[in-house]
Amino acid sequence: MPRGTRDEDGLTTLQRYILAYLRRVNASYARPVRSAELAQQFNITDSYAREQTRPLVVRGLVAVRGGPKGGYYLAGNVTAVPKTPGQGA
């Protein structure tokens, strides 16, 4: 899938990877993941990580903890992370 292309659920491939990463590292309110960590993990800029994470926040898939120790974590109502490419159906 080309970069920036959205799947049937409206998520880009990168957004799926972000969700999977937040799940893998057990991101939570107590241990949120900063945009700089996402940027380093996916070899993108910090601002692009924030840009790609914002739609996930708007859709209620990801929550944000503000402040100096803030970052992103999976919202409490997320029970399943959509499949990332290569995981099969």
Image (cartoon, rainbow, N blue to C red):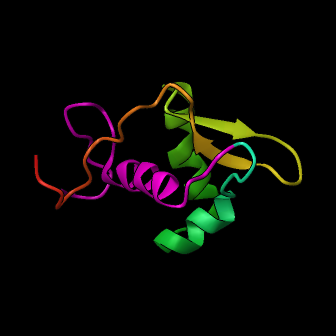
Task: Reply above or below: 11 against 1.
Answer: above
Would residue 69 appear left or right of 77 to someone viewing this image?
A: right
- Quarter of the image for the C terminus: give it: top left
Frontmost residue, 78 versus 35 = 78
Image location of residue 11, percent across then percent down:
33, 39
Image location of residue 35, percent across then percent down:
65, 58
Image location of residue 48, percent across then percent down:
56, 57
Would residue 89 appear left or right of 20 to someone viewing this image?
A: left
Residue 9 sits inside the magenta stretch: yes
Residue 73 sits inside the magenta stretch: no
Residue in the picture at 52% in, 72% down: 41
Frontmost residue, 67 versus 26 = 26
Residue furthest to the right: 68
Q: Which residues are magenta?
A: 1-28
Residue in the picture at 60% in, 52% down: 27
Task: Reply above or below: 11 against 60.
Answer: below
Residue 36 falls in which quadrant of the image?
A: bottom right
Residue 81 falls in which quadrant of the image?
A: top left
Residue furthest to the left: 89
Would residue 20 appear left or right of 39 to someone viewing this image?
A: left
Residue in the picture at 21% in, 57% down: 85
Image location of residue 37, percent across then percent down:
63, 67
Residue 45 visible to an observer of this rendering: no
